[in-house]
Image (cartoon, rainbow, N blue to C red):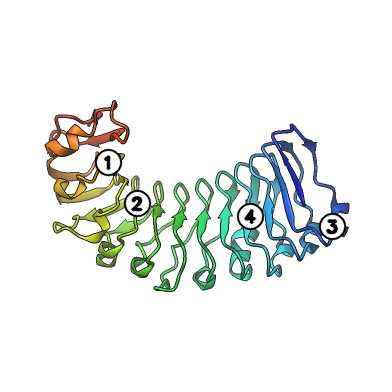
Amino acid sequence: GITMKYNRISGSIPSEMGILTQMRYFEIQNNVLTGTIPTEIGNWNKLSAFLVNWNKLEGTFPITFAPNNRLGTIFVNGNRLKGDSLVSSLSILKNLEWLEARENDLTGTLSADIANLNRLDIIDLRNNSLTGTIPNNWNETHMISSLMVSHNNITGRLPDTLGRVPRLRKLHISGNEMTGSIPVSYYNLSSLEELYLDDNNFYGGLPQTPEPIYENMEEFSIHDNAFSGRFPAEYFESSKLKLLSLHRNQLTGTITETICERTDTSQANSIRTLTADCDMIICDCCTKCY
């Protein structure tokens, strides 16, 4: 394998490297690689990890990687990749466990076939140009723990079947064009730690009973939507809470004294961000009122 990080390596990836058919691990991160990813390296059919975060690579992701049954990790964050070849290849990469491709200019839609990737754990496609909807064919056998697609052009509603996934810890959908309310199935997501729904067109109320979704919540961001009704602050008093962002909605209620006590930054696990529409929600300790 090859591992080179923070070495200021420039130039392009030589297409001649395609002859290295025994390559199992390729990592050149945080350098200044330019040019495209050669289609020839898709011949590395024993490759398990391809890591080229934070370079200046351009063009599309080679579809020649698609038949690889061993490729489990792909990191291409912070490049200049475009096109839909990476997203359209996902359903074919049967061993894929971890994909990070944020901050590119990737296009395409998430195929329903990605729910057939039994090993898929983390998918991060934030800050791209994806369209379409989030697939709605998840079930209890899926291993996914992080689904992060914030700041794209995704439409539609929250897929109710995602509420069946037992290991889901992070759901980031900020800055899209989605609508609808939070599905009742999500109330049982007891593993959920981060829920980012802000800057969409969601509406409706929040559950008013002590549901499992509240139990391990650390970051809850729903600002800039049209949520309404009483905010059930009493269910957000967990010592794990770090961020609560509620502003620019139609919520009412009162932030409890227990929550306010945790905004003391001298505490090790304090709430660092607490925002609300203070003309509708009584909040004596918000870090910012709107």
Q: Earlier in the sequence, mark 2 or mark 1?
A: 2
- Which amino acid type corresponds to the residue marked 4 in the rendered image? Ile
For residue 74, which numbered disc appears in the image?
A: 4
Q: Which residue is mark 2?
A: 193
Q: Earlier in the sequence, mark 3 or mark 2?
A: 3
Name, please, the residue furthest toward the front. 268
Q: Earlier in the sequence, mark 4 or mark 2?
A: 4
- Which amino acid type corresponds to the residue marked 1 in the rendered image? Leu
Residues under labels 4 and 2: Cα distance?
24 Å
Identified at 44% across, 59% down, the residue is: 145
Query: Would you place residue 259 above or below residue 163 in this image?
Result: above
Residue 251, horizontal then vertical, whole percent: 16, 45
> Where is the C terminus found, in terms of image quarters?
top left
Residues under labels 1 and 3: Cα distance?
49 Å
Q: Quick one: SS at disc 1? A: strand
Q: Which residue is mark 1?
A: 244
Query: Would you place residue 160 above or below residue 99 in this image?
Result: below
- Which amino acid type corresponds to the residue marked 3 in the rendered image? Gly
Q: Earlier in the sequence, mark 1 or mark 3?
A: 3
Q: Earlier in the sequence, mark 4 or mark 3?
A: 3
For residue 18, which numbered disc appears in the image?
A: 3
Q: Nearer the viewer, mark 3 or mark 2?
A: 2
127 and 236: which is toward the camera: 236
Q: Quick one: SS at disc 4? A: strand
Classify residue 121 as left or right of residue 48. left
